[in-house]
Structure formats: structure tokens, C-alpha cells
Amino acid sequence: MDFLLDVTDLHVHFHLREGVLRAVNGVSLQVRPNQTLGVVGESGCGKSITAKAIMGLLPPKATITGGQVLLAPREPGGTPLELSSLKPNGKEMRGILGADIAMIFQEPMTSFSPVHTIGNQIVESIRLHRTATRKEARDIAIETLRLVQVPMAERRVDAYPHELSGGLRQRCMIAMALCCKPRMLVADEPTTALDVTIQAQILTLIRRLQSELQMAVMMITHDLGVIAQVADHVVVMYLGRVVEKADTPTLFAKPLHPYTLGLMASIPRLDQNEGTRLHSIRGSVPDPFFTPEGCPFHPRCDKFIAGTCDCGEPPELVDVAPNHAVACHLFSAGTTDSGSKPTTEECTEHAPA
């Protein structure tokens, strides 16, 4: 079995007073053993909701309305477990979270309980998933804090979250996620609100721990620089859909979707002249209650084709090369301004300047 986690045609809807909000619309992705999948996109594109749906952590008004989430068996030859069919608060799902899949949440200051020590919260997770006395669990907690390079772990284990800096809180959050040695780590914006130096340390730490513990990582971020450093494969999301996916070298060498090209062009470059205005994708992510007809990106797209991109169904994800798929009418419809299917060079040529 070549996957650890397999998500197929996942749909997540929020049933609100204003109507139905379609947060995730047919997302399909795979996380492979011992590899890192990067999920990238603007805020509001469905990255975190996809991760929470996988782990059964959706808010009360959100439901999975379609699709399948499969987790590979722990033993070779076993049957994959369908996570999307399990009760979120059921015993089986609680046994999986932490032991098989763990998560680093976006903001460690609000993810930790402010009235319990760091050690008590890590010990609780250990005793839930491993057979250990309270003293043994405390020793494991201290050892895990050392593993993530928390200085003076014997003292920090009794500290409260507000007594630690942002970087230390993030390391403690990683320690709590790794204390039961999960097969997969979901890192939801693990470097948010950290300065550049601490961000680099956290990313280096995650890469080292992945190598030592032989685990898979799903890295969720809006920062393409982070993706370039850590990911083996990349999924680009926009308005709840996957618009492009490829292995990391291919995506950075030959991005094809106009949205991906816009994200790439928005990265500051060292070779730009002083005073050059930074590129930005015009407009903003549409209101999910009123999604545009046709391709959801067409109101912001520099390669918009009238009568094609703005009508009908959104383009399907199609393979354009080995390990490279794009959801764009430039490829799926087989038409361009000249009436022929574009090449990679033609699409790159029309990237935003």
C-alpha cells in the first residue's frame, strides 16, 4: 500500500442560518509514508477545514457530506480504516488521534489549557494512548521535551503556557503531538506568529523528528517558502478545491495554474530593483455563499476566457504530466486565445509580471 492517508472527493458543508457554506468541494489528496505533503493557499481556501475533517475535529455546524478518508492499517496486509465513517467522539476515533495521527495546532497560546501545566497536558495524552503510570508518563514527557530541544526540560514540564515564549510554546505543542509517536503529523501553520529565526528552528526540528521517527507530515501553510524547504509533494487549494498538485521540484520549476503562478509572482525576489512594486493577485477570495459560476478563480485570472471560464461547472483536475495535475480550462477545455491547447511554456509566459 503506497499511501498512509488517502482522501477522495471530500466535501464539507457548514449549515448556518444564512444558508449552506461549502467549505471543501471535492478535495482529493494522498499522504505517503515518511514523506511531507504541503497544502498551500490563501486564507479561507479550506486548508485547515480539510485537516480537521480528516481528524474528526470539525465544529458542530460542519458535516462531511461526501467523500472518503482512508487510513492505512498499522500491520501489513490489513484493511484500511475509513475515518470519515467513524463517530468523531467515538472510542475508535479517540484511539486513532494522538496514536496514529497527531496535530500541531495553529496558535499554541490558545491550544494549550491556560490553567494546567505543560507537563500535565502531555502526561494526559501519554496515559490515554500508552500503558504507563503517572511517574512513567512524566518521565516520557520530560524526555519528549528534550527531544524537541526545550532547555531545562525538568523545570519546563511544570511551567504554565503563559510562562513560556512563543517559540517554546510551539516546541511544547510539537512535544505533545509526538509523545505517542504517531505515524502522521498534521502541522497547521506551525510557524504562525513566530519570527524568522524561530521559524527556521521549528522547520528544522520538524524535519529532524520526521527522519528520526519515520513519520509522514501534512504541512498546511500559506507560505510557499516553507513549502519549498520541507515538502516532497504540494497541493494548491483555492476556495475549497484542489487547483494544482505536483511534486515540489516540478511545481516550482513549471507552475501551470494561473493561481499558482500568481502566488509564485507574489514572493519577494532578491534580484528585484529597489522600489519595484510587489505583485499581488487582484481582488480577494470570493464569498463562499456566492461562489462564481464556472471556474471559481476566473474573476481574478489574467488568462480568463469569456464564455468558457465563467460558465458551466468548475474545471476538473486533469493530468498534464507525470505527477502533475491542474484544474484549469486552459488544459481541460483544450482551448486558448488561439484555439489550441497551451503548452507549459505558453502558460508560464503569461504569468503575472
Image (cartoon, helix red, strand yellow):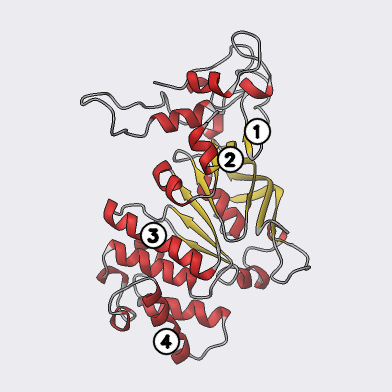
Q: Earlier in the sequence, mark 4 or mark 3?
A: 4
Q: Where residue 268 sits: x, y (%)?
A: 32, 34
User: How packed is label 4: few (under 14 Cα within 10 Å), some, or many (20 or more)?
Assistant: some
Q: CA distance from mark 2 to mark 4?
A: 42 Å
Tell me whether the residue at label 1 lies in contact with that at label 2, contact meaning CB atoms closer than 8 angstroms: yes
Q: Is residue 274 left or right of residue 89?
A: left
> Callout 2, which amino acid?
Ala
Q: Where residue 92 sits: x, y (%)?
A: 67, 71
Q: Is residue 266 left or right of residue 177?
A: left
Q: Secondary structure at mark 4?
A: helix
Q: Earlier in the sequence, mark 2 or mark 4?
A: 4
Q: Earlier in the sequence, mark 1 or mark 2?
A: 2
Q: Secondary structure at mark 2?
A: strand
Q: Is residue 62 above or below residue 109?
A: above
Q: Which residue is mark 4?
A: 139
The residue mark sitting in front, 1 or 2, is 1
> Callout 3, which amino acid?
Thr
**Residue 195 can be seen in this image:** no
Q: Which residue is mark 1?
A: 321
Tell me whether the residue at label 2 lies in contact with that at label 4, contact meaning CB atoms closer than 8 angstroms: no
Q: Earlier in the sequence, mark 4 or mark 1?
A: 4
Q: Where residue 182 sits: x, y (%)?
A: 56, 69
Q: Which residue is mark 2?
A: 246
Q: Is residue 215 left or right of residue 80?
A: left
Q: Which image quadrant: the N terminus? A: bottom right
Q: Secondary structure at mark 3?
A: helix
Q: Earlier in the sequence, mark 3 or mark 2?
A: 3
Q: Which residue is mark 3?
A: 204
